[in-house]
Amino acid sequence: MNATVSSAGSNAEMAAADLMVAELEAAGVRLAFGVISIHNMPFLDAMRRRGVIRFISARGEAGAANMADAATRVGPAPAVVVTSTGTGAGNAAGALIEALTAGVPLIHLTGQIDSKYLDRGWGFIHEAQDQLGMLRAVSKAAWRISRPEDAVPILREAMLVARTPPCGPVSIEIAIDTQRVPLPARAPLGPLPVSVAEPDAALLSQAADWLESAERPVIWAGGGTLHATAELRALADAGIPVVMSTSGRGVLDGDHPASLGTFTQLPPVAGVIESADLLIVAGSHLRSNETRTYGMKLPERLIRIDADPAADGRGYPSALFILGDSKPALHGLLRGAAGGRQEWLAQATAARIAAEDRVRSEVGVYAALIDAVTKYLPRDGLFVRDITLSNSIWANRLPRIFAPRHTVHAMGGGIGQGLQHAIGAALACPAKRTLAIVGDGGFMLNPGELATAVQENARLAIILMNDRRYGVIRNIQDADYGGRHGDTDLVHPDFGMFAASLHIPYRKLSHAADADEAIGWAMDQPGLAFVEVDMVSFGPFAAGYAGPPRQSKPA
């Protein structure tokens, strides 16, 4: 670690911003994303002088926060987003909501105006009314550092809160003059340890008994099991089928015979879940878009394992609720896992294959594109998707994923985050190849971040699905609004010229027969590659998609 001296102090002093950056370094942070501005410059200057954390200069705070989110999801260490106060912090709000929805322990640092002008409403440049209240609304927790000596304790507490399940983003605001205050120099204290929430032994024993007596058990694994892959694999090896939420995708190897993939809503797999005599839900919200808006008939004997006490009865009643970390809880169930369930496992495996076949039948000519993505995406590759027709119809389910933390998509359902997520993922794991499926509408929400990808030499293949409209919304208008179309047709730039202006290798894919060559070419590029899929030339999917099934529709 480089020695750091505040500009106003001696060798025995460090600015508060430097001490905070040193704590981030001790926590393993190596990537920070943001936009440089007046009120965050002490942080960025400290990062630059110390030379440990790489700062990625994004084109907007929304993009920066999405990049840091994805980098934290897939990377070996947490990432940080640094914004300016006021509109800068406000620009990051939507991305923080996405991180909160996905349970990502993202650290958000934002500046504040000079302390003596705070909360006066004088119209000081970058001033925002109740910025802390806004940050509390879009974060798991938020703090204001008012005294420089509180900077490190608050940061350490914030990092602990972010990493304590249920995880989520945390925000810290600190006035620019407070960032500069010299404090006694010292070595960083390092991160506080996260306590593992041990499940109640008696409840766990009861759950194991239920599992032992069950003939048709199923495990529903969510994002709260990303660290429990060994336990899930052991349960699956014992013949217990495992279905995954999209946030839990990859917690069980996609080729495992007990894997039901993420086909929760498709009839073959839904039938297996609904006919089970025991359902163990571990670390999952059972979200509306994965349960037919809570219309799935789940088994009455439902065991719920979650670190969040609010999960008990959320969406569905629990027959047994076990509060605690999923890893020790799933380990405790192994006692009841043994048993001859080969016929049930064979039924579940057949259902997964039938679900895959159904998806392929619904995509029509796009099956060639799916085959190419499946062929060229490495087993350890990163698969990022925006909210598009393609994501909703096939990319959230195909291709198979072989490990956790290898896939990213917008859990909150917002469009336009895929490109930034892909950039963050690619920069966090440069040794891996990242493939992103994005839609034309979502891409145009933040196309400037493509310049960030070029500037930072991201190793990323972008597959742009261009149907020249908001395809999902148009289908909803067909299904629910009598085909009255409006506000969905889009005007775009020439994407080939746009890519050329940034010197990005580009191909336009207009025929399914050329999909293998185009995707193979993109994945072979050493850095960025851009493939535009002309969906108008390809034609429509064999089956339409008008959003997740809903219990009610407009009159």
Image (cartoon, helix red, strand yellow):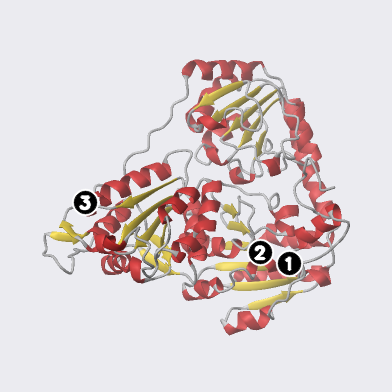
Q: Which residue is mark 2?
A: 438
* Mark 3 or mark 2: whose residue is earlier in sequence: 3
Q: Position of residue 122 (x, y in %)?
A: 36, 66
Q: Nearer the viewer, residue 183 or 136?
A: 136
State which mark lies toward you, 3 or 2: 3
Q: Which residue is mark 3?
A: 149
Name the kind of residue labelled 1 in the image. Answer: Asp
Q: Position of residue 348 (x, y in %)?
A: 74, 33
Q: In the picture provided, is 193 more to the left or to the right than 75?
A: left
Residue 487 circle label: none
Q: Residues within 10 Å of mark 3 (few under 14, many from 20)?
A: some
Q: Position of residue 258 (x, y in %)?
A: 68, 35
Q: Which residue is mark 1?
A: 516
In percent of the image, x 35 and y 53: which residue is there? 28
Residue 505 appears in view = yes
Q: Is residue 527 above or below residue 230?
A: below
* Mark 1 or mark 3: whose residue is earlier in sequence: 3
**Quadrant in the rendering for residue 471:** bottom right
Q: In the picture provided, is 225 more to the left or to the right than 169?
A: right
In percent of the image, x 23 and y 63: which residue is there? 180
Name the kind of residue labelled 2 in the image. Answer: Val
Name the kind of residue labelled 3 in the image. Answer: Glu
Q: Marks 1/3: CA distance?
A: 59 Å
